[in-house]
Structure formats: C-alpha cells, structure tokens
Amino acid sequence: LKVSVGKGDGNGRSFDPRISGDGRTVVYASVADDLVDGDTNAASDIFAALVTEQGSQPYGGTPRSLPGRLFARDYDTGGEGVAYHDTDATNNGGQYRPSEGVDLSTSSAAGDVYLAGVQTGEWLKFTITVGSAGSYTISGRITSPFSGGRFHLENSSGVTLGGPWSVRNTGGWQNWQAQSFGTVQLAAGTQTLRLFVDGGGFNLDYLDYTATTTGGSFAAKINFQPATAPTVAGYAVDAGAVFAARNGLTYGWSAAVDTRDRNANSDQRIDTLALMQSSSNPNARWEIAVPNGTYAVHVVCGDPSYFDGNFNLLVEGMVSVTGRASSITPFREGNVTVTVTDGRLTISNGSGSYNTKIDYVEIQQVPTGNG
C-alpha cells in the first residue's frame, strides 16, 4: 500500500493517516500550520490523501494459465489481507511457504503439498491468464471428515462466478477423492480469482479448470431422487418412472425403480439416488433420447448411508464407473465419451455389478469436424 499525502509549507506539521480495516480505503491527514512561538493565529488544514493499492502478484512471477490445473499452494504473493486471509498468522503445516499465514501441509497419502484444514471466512487470490473466454468446468482433489465444507469463486470485483459448492465427506482427513463442482464463466486475459471458504473443515490440493465443450446443441443434467425431495438447481428430476417425456426431455427407466433421499449429505446430488439392482428390478436400464452424435458423460454412483455396492456401470456399453463402495470411498464417479447411433443414450449394469445406486448424470454433446 502506498500513501501519498499533499505537501504543506507551514512552520509545523503533524500527519495522522487513518486506513480502513480492509487496508484499501479512507486515508486522511491532519495538519497544523504556522505554529510560531507567540503567534496567536493557527490554521488547521485537512490534506487530501492518495491511496494506491498494490494488490497481489502471481506466485513465482507468472500468472497461472487456464484451462489447466490450479494448485491451492500457488496462491498469490502480497501477504495477509492482500493475497490471502487466514484466521491466524502461522502456517500451521509448516510446508512450502512457511513464513506466511496460509496452512500448507503434506502427507504420504496426499503425495503433494496441499491447503490444510481451511476455516470459514478464509480466502486465497490467484492471478490467472485465461486463453479463451467461455464456460469452464471446475473439479478438484479434496478430503474432509465432515459434510459442511463449502466454497465459491469470485472475480476481483467480488462478484460470485460460481458456487457456493459443497465439499463431500470423504471419510477422513487423508482420504483423497476427486470431486466435480460446477461451471464458471471467465473472460479472456489476465485477471484475479478469489477462492472464498463459506464452510470450513476440508483440505484442497488443486482445482482443474476445463473448457466446457461448445458446438454441440444437446446437454442435460439429471438428478436421481424421490419426487418429494428438494431439487438441485440446473438438474432435471428423475424419480424412478419409466421412459417418457418430462421436464422438456424424454428419459426414464426400462421399468420403474425405487429412489431414496438419505438426508445424510449436504450435497443433494449425492444425498439422493436410484436403485438400479433392487430385488424387484435387478437389471434396470436407464435411457434418454438424444440426437445421434458423440457425447461426454459424467456419472456418479454411491450411497451416503450404506456402503454395499460394487459398481461396473456402462454407458452405451462402455465402462464408466467401477469400484466397490466403502465407508472411506462411498462414491465412485467416471467420465466417458460415447457415440449414439440409435437416438438413445443408455446406462446399464455391467458384469459383476452388485447393488448399484446411481446419483446423478451430466451429458454434453461433443462437436465433430470443424463445427
């Protein structure tokens, strides 16, 4: 912060600058002139002050390029209140940037230096250079033994770009998992992002910013849930009914399936589910009508309360989600690119799949050729 105060020319001057608590605004100086011994005339002037905020600078001197991976440890330089805010002045993990107040730690499970044990109200700034304006999908690597973690992203003006997003309970401080969050719109060029913690109690290794595929005309997000459960913004509800037109789309099941709302996780997308292998419908198949073409599909399976599934989920016959659920990793997710030739995108159970529970699916058409 630079403070430049207007010059006075009296016999005596006293300056008493005042800076606001955020370190960015309101500076003034009080000045007394012509205080000559024996002189009964005194003048007191208020001098205007110029405040210049230097701002944060990219760590290492070069802005991080997006699309790409943004490590939490590489927040900007500039110190407390400028590049970051932490609830205490000590790097309690003692790693990477030990003289600063942001808590950075490492472990064999992490295999990396990560942002540790964030608290509500803390934030980090990042100077970035965005290659092309557009929509970017945010995903990352996180851990948390709780269900209340939340954060959002905002620009240099404090306008929220995306979130708040919930951080799922991964079952422990060192049970690292990948998680998808949402999308943000970014302008091209160099700019500043701020990651603000709305609910503490999680570790963060990095966030990936992936340019959202454009050019395809079809996109859908479906959350599998009871009809009476709270809905998720931007997601159409699938309440287990058979294939039919609804919510501006045509989708559903080969035969009706049961759904659940566990009320165990703050992220409604993974708190609700549909049973794909119940005793009444042991081999359920889900479909959605789409134009023929290529699609990027992101799908999540699991149950926040019961860890009894072994997943081998197929999208158009291609394996998308595999693995056994456990208390440490109750959810499994996958991404797959498939081609539809019959007007329906199909999700089904593969060989060895047991008690599969599907949470939500996100579908985006992928452009082909030069279009």
Image: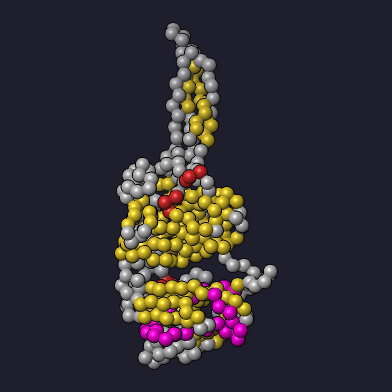
Count numbered badges in the picture: 0
Please determine whether, in this image, residue 198 is positioned above or below residue 341: above
| Outermost residue, top side | 38
Report the quarter where the C terminus lies: bottom right
Q: Is residue 88 visible?
A: no
Question: Where is residue 53 shown, x and y percent of the image?
Answer: 51, 38
Say which of 320 and 224 sits in front. 320
- Write down the quadrant of residue 280 in the picture: bottom left
Say which of 353 and 159 sits in front. 353
Residue at image position (39%, 62%) is 142
Question: Where is residue 310 shown, x and y percent of the image?
Answer: 37, 80
Give the dominant element type of the magenta stretch: helix, strand or loop: strand
Q: Is residue 29 visible?
A: yes
| Outermost residue, bottom side | 280
Question: Where is residue 68 shown, x and y percent of the image?
Answer: 52, 58
| Outermost residue, right side | 370
Residue at image position (43%, 8%) is 37
Question: Where is residue 242 shown, x and y percent of the image?
Answer: 50, 88
- Write down the quadrant of residue 214 in the picture: bottom right
Residue at image position (61%, 57%) is 132
Query: Is residue 324 located in the magenta-colored stretch of the structure?
Result: no
Please determine whether, in this image, residue 77 is positioned above or below residue 267: above
Which color scheme does this rendered protein use? secondary structure
Query: Is residue 354 located in the magenta-colored stretch of the structure?
Result: yes
Q: Is residue 207 left or right of residue 187?
A: left
Please determine whether, in this image, residue 84 is positioned above or below residue 242: above
Residue at image position (33%, 65%) is 175
Residue numbers of the magenta segment: 337-365
Q: Is residue 335 left or right of residue 293?
A: left
